[in-house]
Image: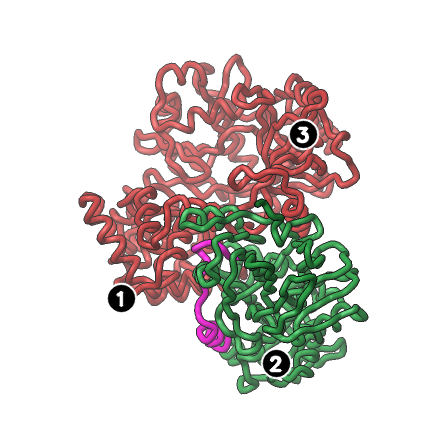
Chain colours: A red, B green
């Protein structure tokens, strides 16, 4: 565990990519194979089966620290991380362990079936023989989520540096549903393994945001334009009579979209589609919130299938008849995709994401304004000659999102942030006017600069009217412009509306509380855009 | 018979009506008792100031021509029958807890304090009282400090490694107190020690008071960085994120504060190294100090007051929250250190 802890510290202490890559590569060169494999797994959100519950961890940690459970629970949101809270609150270790990362993981797996008493004994003993960082990492093995600024791309580069393998090939190998307890470093990184390759998706190509207009991109005819749909990006793989549906977050979601199974009847083996999974009814997209109901469950009951059907709006073809098309230009991939979809019966839940063929950037800008009516978030602009690259590579794929909806609201409650912002008031509740009353309608906690958060924090400390636990009521004085992507009817909120992605666009210091918008204004937005 | 309490809490600050004095007031008042010279406790605009003799040089440096009187630690002053005395708080040089006593009702206003002696500040002394007003900046069990010697070794190791790699080490530390505390732990064996003007100004005042600090070089606009390879630079927190650090070429940044205990705070500041070193008490320090006063009534101020007060009540104290405008170490991390601007 010590070598892994050193690696973690080295990664945590720098924000420079080159230093992170070097630290990782150095580790990959010297670590044992199993430790390497587990490190790759942990940094790509894979973790051993959870041996103990987080409730057990909290209870045991409070007990070991000699404090009441409520006090532990109050510390947790301030630290913002359960594994870290536990490691900070415990007394110092009384001995040191030399066990490796893999050994600790195997021990954790071994106790999954033990009695609660044995689990507790094991965890308390572990806490007492690991120092600060090691203890934090041990807790992380249980709770998951190593957020240390190591992207898949960065890790792949380090692996390429350490193993001498091709980076793109490694990126492809690390995709998919491999599990560290059923494979090994050699199989994953070095050997040819057709079985593993069957379900493996290609790394997604990600678009960059456009600031302003796309006029600088050059001739309009070199680019393809289409709607940016408000669904989930997915990759649909048909190989050897099986179908696999992957989300952009690399989650295998095949079982959640059983209607896609019929693609096997219409498309040849060796087909990989890139497209949008979209709720679809009465020939129009459903709001994202409806689709969310489908994502939330592992299996789909018939009623939900009927209420919230999905289609795939396909926009790219990555593999055709078993051939990797990613190096072909988009124009060619697109033509093949159009032809393939054309031959599928219209009743099948798949469409070609339509192209927008207006001739100039100016005309396209006009069309973009109608995106909300089309249930789209904006436009995608892709270079027709571009290959399908991996990850976010600027230049060929652009997203041109709609400007958000905005409303001016009054801050009425403030709560301190956690983790990075533990000592600042950063989470605010906002209200709009209904007559002489302020009706809360949303919370937001991002969008201001650190300097602004500090200024407001000082003000909150001096102007607290009332405390409700960690929440402070403040005088309705400050007005903020709240931006959001969508608005929906809600029966759960007093205001009757729910916003999508609310955030603070700016602090309107030029406005007084009475200048803020009204609930009526919000309801009008609901009628127009909801 | 109901009697008015000796101390009340007003919107100008902590007030003793019988003696007609405020303690660390944040709005202008005729007479102020000052616990120490940090900007959020010693503000300008009061009629008369009273502080300890060793806090006076910094007070005069920061607040210029104020009407200031001084008192030695432990000496008692009578103000309309109220016995007032100052006792070491161990926070920075000259810092004091202020004791006010009248007919058996004894109040101690802690100001900012820490238990561990730092070698420069007069070491903290517990004072018995009936009512204790305690700061609790770090009043959570997640805040526990390692010894000063341990942190000093961490800083030296980091400096030595950087120096060997030809990199400048830049530490952010509060201009008055923390910076001198770090300085006093270092010597110039590894390489030279350079200082930002805001810190050198405090150094000058403290040296004149007889505080021993290693040799430092002031960084001036025409400063030659190449003359001091592998140097350590001490700068106020705000300078760390500014253009100012660029003149040192390749460098590693560190920050010394109790907040560095939290990984999230370290990451927010995009620092290379966090050194957990505070001039405030940690959790255990607060609890032991409160216990040593023998007070039944505890008033907590500044920090995680609601949680800390709840805990005190659960272990048998009569604890309440006092709202104040003190910012303490939160201000340091938040870069509102006033001395930076000067």
Q: Position of residue B237 (x, y in %)?
A: 63, 64
Location of residue A156 (image quadrant) = bottom left
Q: Are marks 3 and 2 on the same chain?
A: no
Please state which of residues B289 and B152 is positioned toward the viewer in this rendering.
Answer: B289
Please state which of residues A343 and A368 is positioned toward the viewer in this rendering.
Answer: A368
In this rendering, would A189 be left or right of A515? left
Q: Position of residue A229 (x, y in %)?
A: 56, 28
Asked if residue A401 is positioned above or below residue A416 in the image, the reply reads above
Q: Position of residue A203 (x, y in %)?
A: 45, 43
Chain ID at mark 3: A
Q: Which mark is residue A98?
A: 1
Instruction: Point out the residue furthest to the top here.
Output: A282
Q: Crowdedness of circle 1 by 10 Å Cα count: few (<14), some, many (20+)? A: few
Q: Which mark is residue B193?
A: 2
* Residue linked to disc 3: A405
**Disc 1, disc 2: CB below 8 Å?**
no
Chain ID at mark 1: A
Residue shown at 47%/22% (left/top)?
A311
User: Magenta part of the protein: which range?
Assistant: B134-157
- Of labels 3 and 2, the one closer to you: 2
Placement of the C terminus of chain A among the 4 image quadrants: top right
Q: Crowdedness of circle 3 by 10 Å Cα count: few (<14), some, many (20+)? A: some
């Amino acid at each position: 565990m010590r070598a892994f802890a050193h690696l973690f510290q080295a990664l945590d202490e720098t924000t420079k990519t080159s230093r992170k890559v070097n630290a990782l590569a150095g580790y990959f060169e010297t670590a044992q194979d199993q430790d390497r494999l587990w490190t790759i797994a942990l940094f790509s959100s894979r973790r051993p089966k959870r041996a103990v519950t987080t409730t057990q961890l909290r209870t045991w940690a409070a007990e070991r620290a000699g404090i009441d459970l409520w006090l532990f629970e109050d510390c947790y949101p301030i630290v913002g991380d359960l594994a870290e809270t536990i490691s900070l609150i415990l007394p110092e270790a009384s001995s040191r362990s030399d066990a490796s990362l893999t050994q600790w993981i195997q021990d954790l797996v071994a106790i999954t079936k033990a009695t609660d008493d044995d689990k507790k004994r094991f965890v308390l003993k572990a806490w007492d023989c690991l120092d600060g960082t090691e203890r934090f990492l041990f807790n992380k093995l249980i709770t998951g989520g190593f957020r240390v600024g190591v992207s898949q791309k960065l890790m792949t580069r380090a692996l390429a540096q350490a193993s001498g393998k091709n980076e793109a090939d490694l990126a492809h190998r690390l995709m998919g549903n491999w599990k560290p307890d059923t494979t090994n470093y050699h199989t994953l990184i070095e050997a040819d393994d057709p079985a593993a390759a069957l379900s493996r998706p290609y790394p997604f190509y990600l678009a960059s945001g456009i600031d302003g207009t796309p006029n600088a991109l050059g001739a309009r005819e070199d680019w393809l334009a289409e709607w940016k749909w408000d669904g989930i990006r997915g990759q649909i793989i048909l190989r050897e009579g099986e179908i696999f549906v992957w989300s952009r977050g690399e989650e295998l979601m095949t079982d959640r979209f059983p209607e896609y199974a019929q693609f096997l009847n219409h498309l040849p083996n060796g087909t990989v589609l890139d497209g949008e999974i979209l709720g679809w009814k009465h020939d129009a997209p459903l709001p994202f919130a409806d689709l969310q109901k489908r994502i939330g469950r592992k299996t789909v009951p018939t009623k939900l299938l009927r209420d919230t059907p999905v289609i795939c709006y396909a926009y790219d073809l990555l593999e055709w008849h078993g051939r990797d098309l990613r190096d072909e230009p988009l124009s060619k991939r697109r033509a093949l995709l159009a032809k393939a979809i054309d031959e599928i019966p219209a009743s099948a839940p798949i469409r070609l994401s339509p192209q927008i063929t207006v001739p100039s950037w100016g005309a396209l800008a006009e069309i973009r304004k109608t995106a909300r009516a089309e249930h789209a978030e904006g436009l995608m602009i892709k270079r027709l000659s571009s290959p399908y690259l991996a990850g976010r590579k600027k230049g060929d794929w652009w997203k041109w999102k709609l400007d958000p909806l905005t409303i001016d609201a009054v801050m009425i409650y403030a709560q301190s942030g956690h983790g990075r912002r533990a000592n600042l008031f950063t989470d605010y509740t906002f209200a709009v006017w209904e007559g002489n009353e302020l009706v809360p309608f949303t919370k937001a906690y991002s969008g201001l600069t650190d300097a602004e958060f500090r200024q407001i924090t000082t003000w909150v400390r001096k102007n607290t009217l009332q405390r409700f636990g960690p929440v402070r009521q403040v005088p309705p004085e400050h007005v903020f412009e709240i931006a959001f992507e969508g608005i929906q009817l809600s029966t759960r909120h007093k205001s009757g509306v729910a916003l999508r992605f609310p955030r603070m666009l700016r602090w309107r210091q030029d406005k007084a509380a009475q200048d803020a918008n009204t609930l009526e204004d919000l309801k009008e937005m609901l009628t127009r855009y909801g | 018979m109901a009697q008015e309490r000796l101390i009340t809490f007003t919107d100008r600050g902590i007030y003793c009506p019988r003696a007609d004095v405020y303690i660390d007031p944040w709005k202008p008042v005729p007479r102020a008792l000052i616990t120490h010279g940090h900007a959020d406790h010693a503000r300008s605009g009061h009629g008369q100031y009273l502080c300890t003799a060793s806090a006076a040089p910094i007070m005069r440096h920061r607040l210029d021509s104020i009407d200031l009187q001084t008192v030695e630690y432990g000496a008692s002053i009578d103000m309309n029958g109220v016995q007032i005395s100052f006792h070491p708080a161990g926070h920075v040089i000259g810092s004091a807890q202020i004791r006010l006593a009248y007919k058996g009702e004894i109040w101690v206003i802690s100001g900012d304090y820490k238990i561990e002696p730092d070698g420069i500040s007069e070491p903290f002394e517990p004072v018995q009282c009936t009512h204790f007003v305690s700061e609790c900046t770090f009043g959570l069990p997640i805040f526990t400090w390692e010894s000063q010697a341990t942190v000093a070794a961490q800083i030296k190791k980091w400096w030595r490694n950087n120096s060997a790699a030809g990199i400048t080490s830049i530490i952010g530390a509060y201009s008055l107190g923390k910076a001198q505390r770090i300085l006093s732990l270092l010597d110039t064996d590894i390489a030279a020690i350079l200082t930002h003007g805001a810190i050198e100004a405090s150094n000058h005042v403290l040296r004149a008071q007889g505080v021993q600090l290693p040799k430092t070089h002031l960084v001036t606009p025409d400063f030659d960085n190449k003359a001091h390879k592998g140097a350590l630079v001490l700068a106020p927190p705000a300078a760390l994120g500014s253009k100012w650090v660029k003149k040192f070429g390749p460098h590693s940044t560190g920050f010394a504060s109790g907040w560095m205990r939290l990984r999230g705070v370290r990451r927010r500041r995009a620092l290379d190294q966090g050194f957990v070193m505070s001039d405030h008490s940690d959790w255990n320090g607060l609890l032991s100090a409160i216990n040593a006063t023998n007070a039944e009534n505890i008033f907590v101020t500044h920090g995680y007051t609601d949680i800390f007060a709840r805990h005190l009540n659960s272990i048998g104290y009569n604890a309440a929250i006092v709202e104040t405008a003190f910012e303490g170490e939160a201000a340091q991390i938040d870069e509102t250190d006033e001395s930076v601007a000067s």
